[in-house]
Amino acid sequence: MFVAAGQFVVSSVWEENAQVCVSLMAQAAGRGVSLLVLPEGILARDDIDLDLPIRAAQPLDGAFMTRLLEESAHNNMTTIFTILVPSTPGRAVNMLVALRAGHIVARYAKLHLYDAFSMQESQSIDAGTVIAPVLDVEGVKVGLMTCYDLRFPDMALALALQGA
């Protein structure tokens, strides 16, 4: 299994970010990648306007996801990333999504929010309530976690007990 990371600087314009993701997906698929992992929060970001990611949040059937699903339909590569999905007014869920063959094959709302030092993620992000699923990628069981989740060994243990 060939795994790749697609790294890029997320802009404040979701359409630009979608195009970068589509390009990275096409490049990776063309090189025989089985699993492509993209950054967290790829919908929109602005270092000056810190509320932009919440305002830019889109549902899983929104235009951003639709564009990536269209690209995903061209191959059997698994692509994993996170976007903010609206939850309640002014709030969102940090949703890890796995795409394959034009479908969402797994999703997970981030459980462990980063509330430390000067960062208070819980001020605008709602935590998930369910441990992430284990995803099969070409016979390899992949456990899904994002960002601050890695600081909580119980989650890694739960995924390992599921075979990841």
Image (cartoon, rainbow, N blue to C red):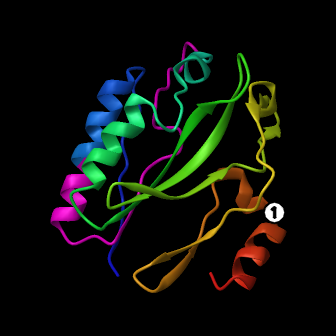
Q: In the visual, does 131 lie left or right of 66?
A: right
Q: Looking at the picture, how far across and down is residue 51, in whole percent? A: 62, 16
Q: Amino acid at mark 1?
A: Phe
**What residue appears at the point 45 percent right and 31 percent down from the top-left corner?**
62
**What residue appears at the point 40 percent right and 55 percent down from the top-left corner?**
103
Q: Looking at the picture, how far across and down is residue 161, in whole percent? A: 75, 84
- The residue tagged 1 is 152
Q: Is residue 138 above or below residue 144?
A: below
Q: Which residues are magenta?
A: 24-49
* Magenta segment, prevailing SS (helix, strand or loop): loop
Label 1: few (<14), some (14–19) or many (≥20) C-alpha neighbours in 10 Å: few
**What residue appears at the point 26 percent right and 35 percent down from the top-left corner?**
19
> Among all residues in the image, which is located at the extreme left?
30
Q: Name the one closer to the observer, 49 or 130.
A: 130
> Among all residues in the image, which is located at the extreme top?
49
Mark 1 lies on a secondary structure that is loop
**What residue appears at the point 62 percent right and 81 percent down from the top-left corner?**
164
Q: Quadrant of residue 52?
A: top right
For the N terminus, the image quarter is: bottom left
Q: In the visual, does 131 lie left or right of 21?
A: right
Q: Is residue 25 magenta?
A: yes
Q: Is residue 111 magenta?
A: no
Q: Looking at the picture, how far across and down is residue 42, in whole percent? A: 46, 37
**Total tally of numbered discs in the picture:** 1
